[in-house]
Image: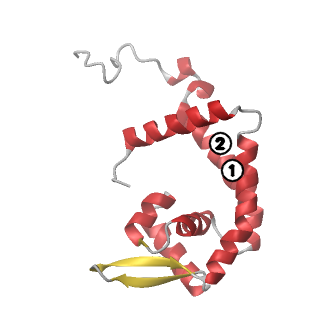
Amino acid sequence: MTDTGDSPDPITRSWLGEVGLNGFAPYLMNRIMGRYNADLRREMAALGLSTAKMRALAVLSVVDGIQMSQLGVYAVVEQSTLSRAVDSLCSDGLARRESDPDDQRATRIFLTRAGRAAFDRMWPHMADSHDRMFQGIPEDERRAFIGTLHKMLNNVRQHEY
């Protein structure tokens, strides 16, 4: 294999046992997000929300009226799970569907007033969990980390958004 500089030679690449779980970024990211989601479960349950519903509400609070396909990308939820979550949000009066006026095959999802109120009740808990993750980390390190995450997302991105 010729070295293109893009990826390490598989023969010289370290194994997970050599790197260790604490040196493997995907493992650390999963642990952090697992803890974040677990911290929010009690508050979500009190509102009748699952993680998928909460993620959809969070996205809609920022990008209201988004196409269903884009909502799945932003919420990081599989399409079948998202469809059930959106069905439930609509049944509960937290969101509504509308046909996309520019593309009759597409559906746009909107947050209702009740959905906004539910998200507004969740947001302080989400912000507290976020702040706990960054406790003791200086602002310059926080900005650098967010910048690195954007670069990583760009490296793995499959969609333009």
Q: Are marks 2 and 1 in contact (CB under 8 Å)?
A: yes
- Label ID, residue 32: 2
Vertical arrangement, residue 23 with respect to residue 117, above or below: above
Vertical arrangement, residue 8 with respect to residue 155, above or below: above
Total number of numbered labels? 2
Vertical arrangement, residue 39 with respect to residue 28, above or below: below
SS state under label 1: helix
Say left or right for 120 vs 83: right
For the C terminus, the image quarter is bottom left
SS state under label 2: helix
| Residue at screen point 35% across, 19% down | 8
Q: Choose top left, top right, bottom left or bottom right for residue 118.
A: bottom right
| Residue at screen point 39% across, 71% down | 67
The residue closer to the viewer here, 96 or 86, is 96
For the N terminus, the image quarter is top left
| Residue at screen point 64% across, 41% down | 31
- Label ID, residue 36: 1
Rendering coords of residue 71 (x, y %): 45, 66
Disc 1 residue type?
A: Tyr
Badge 1, how many Cα within 10 Å: few under 14, some, many 20+?
some
Rendering coords of residue 61 (x, y %): 57, 68
The residue closer to the viewer here, 110 or 44, is 110
Rendering coords of residue 60 (x, y %): 53, 69
Instruction: State whether residue 44 appears in this view.
Output: no
Say left or right for 88 vs 101: right
